Amino acid sequence: MSRAVSMSTDPAAEAGPATGTDTGAAADTGPGIGPDTGAGAVRVRGRVAVIVPAAGKGERLGPGAPKALRELGGFPLLVHAVRTLVTARSVDLVVVAAPPSAEGVAEVQRLLADLPGDTRVVAGGDTRQESVSLALATLPEDCDVVLVHDAARALTPVDVVEAVVAAVRDGAGAVIPVLPVADTVKAVDGDLVTATVDRSTLRAVQTPQGFTRDVLTKAHAAADPTLPATDDAGLVEALGLPVRTVPGHAEAFKITTPFDLVLAEAVLRRRR
């Protein structure tokens, strides 16, 4: 099932999480390009769409509503995430992949109805990978830059969104926000340590991840649905294409456990 509804509402809707400073480029029009070609890469034109897969159950948060619909500070994680996306100057369209049922789609439409901007809801799939593919297939032809963002990273600052878009517009076919790994990392076999990993080359990956539409479409077309990747950049890596990094942000952490919710509440209190 695929159902899309466009909602454009009052920009004066309640302000969400802090959004920071716009660092992105204004949207142009015209065709997109492929992977990063280095110096002299052609600037990517066209509109920017963000896909938000929100059909996951989120079992680590315990029984109850789907993860994206769990509340944080009185609003679902999904609402926090989409509210930030629609405030980004570079973003033209947000497409949310809802739980794959008529009731799930209707509930997400209701939750997002009061947000400003062009926000659409489609039925997602049984996996994250399938949800992204279904949403990708519904995008208008003039969307040449596509971001994929986890609703569970509900407090991601808008600066991160703008930095990812700017990097794709500057010619990178795939872009991910990352943070250095602070903890010592060990390789283990069962309960025995086998090695200490050099963390200087490791990065923790966040979202939104950005792509030219051509690259993301090719990556999903080539993906094995029986071996789902943990992120979309992994699908691009499997094609042998380069993935560029930009700085992430500590507040873009993924809310997947009850303890994460406690941390997120603390971040919200500080922002207010």
Image (cartoon, rainbow, N blue to C red):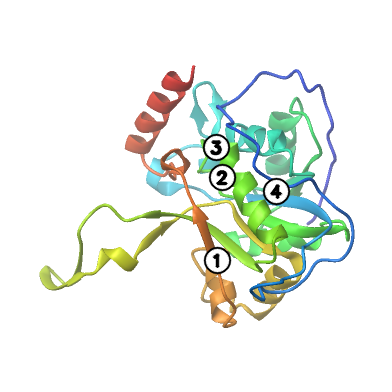
Question: Between residues 147 and 20, which one lies in front from this camera angle?
Answer: 20
Q: Cα distance, mark 3 to mark 1?
A: 19 Å
The correct choice, above or below, for 202 with respect to 258 in the image is: below
Question: Between residues 131 and 242, which one lies in front from this camera angle?
Answer: 242
As drawn, is 268 to the left or to the right of 226? Answer: left
Q: Nearer the viewer, mark 3 or mark 4?
A: 3
Q: Which residue is mark 2?
A: 160
Quadrant containing the N terminus is bottom right
Q: Which residue is mark 3?
A: 157
Label at residue 131: none
Q: Specify the amino acid type for callout 4.
A: Ser
Residue 156 pos. (x, y %): 53, 40
Q: Which residue is mark 4?
A: 101
| Residue 136 visible here | yes
Q: Which residue is mark 1?
A: 244
Q: Quadrant of residue 83?
A: top right
The correct choice, above or below, for 41 with respect to 165 in the image is: below
Q: Specify the amino acid type for callout 3.
A: Pro
